[in-house]
């Protein structure tokens, strides 16, 4: 089953903008390489057009087989990028997402639980 990973970030830390842009480019290369290698099945960066830009300036969205995403999240290059991001951007978040077949499975489970509870 596939899962998604959303990595969100807010404004760049003042005085560290050039390093943050370099990190963005590093992340693009890293995730594009993972996509080309078939490790993940989807990757795209997004910038926000409307938002509280201090909190949310953009995000990366990727998905792939759950074991591959979990393994990626333990790799040294990923961990280094995330550590750099904690120092270069504000409001850094990473969220695991239910996607694809997982949504159907979650809806089915919800229906069974509701029936069991008489709701």
Image (cartoon, rainbow, N blue to C red):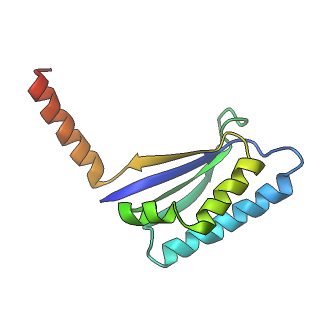
Whole-percent x, y for residue 17 in the image: 84, 52
Residue drawn where x is 23% and y is 40% of the image? 107
The residue positioned farthest toward the right in the image shown: 15
The C terminus lies in which quarter of the figure?
top left
Q: Is residue 101 left or right of residue 116?
A: right
Residue drawn where x is 60% and y is 57% of the image? 45
Whole-percent x, y for residue 32 in the image: 57, 71
Q: Is residue 104 left or right of residue 89?
A: left
- Relative to 55, residue 14 above or below: below
The residue positioned farthest toward the top in the image shown: 119
Q: Is residue 96 left or right of residue 105?
A: right
Residue drawn where x is 41% and y is 66% of the image? 68
The residue positioned farthest toward the bottom in the image shown: 37
- Relative to 11, residue 25 above or below: below
- Relative to 60, residue 36 above or below: below
Whole-percent x, y for residue 38 in the image: 44, 76
Residue 57 found in image quarter: top right
Residue drawn where x is 68% and y is 35% of the image? 55
Whole-percent x, y for residue 76 in the image: 60, 67
Tally of numbered tags: 0
């Amino acid at each position: 089953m596939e899962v998604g990973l959303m990595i969100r970030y807010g404004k760049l830390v003042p005085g560290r903008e050039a390093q943050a842009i370099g990190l963005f480019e590093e992340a693009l290369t890293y995730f594009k390489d993972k996509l080309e290698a078939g490790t993940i099945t989807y990757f795209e960066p997004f910038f926000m057009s409307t938002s509280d830009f201090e909190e949310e300036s953009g995000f990366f969205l990727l998905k792939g087989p759950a074991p591959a995403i979990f393994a990626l999240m333990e790799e040294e290059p990923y961990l280094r990028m995330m550590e750099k991001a904690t120092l270069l951007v504000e409001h850094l978040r990473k969220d695991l997402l239910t996607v694809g077949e997982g949504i159907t499975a979650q809806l089915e489970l919800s229906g069974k639980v509701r029936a069991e509870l008489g709701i």
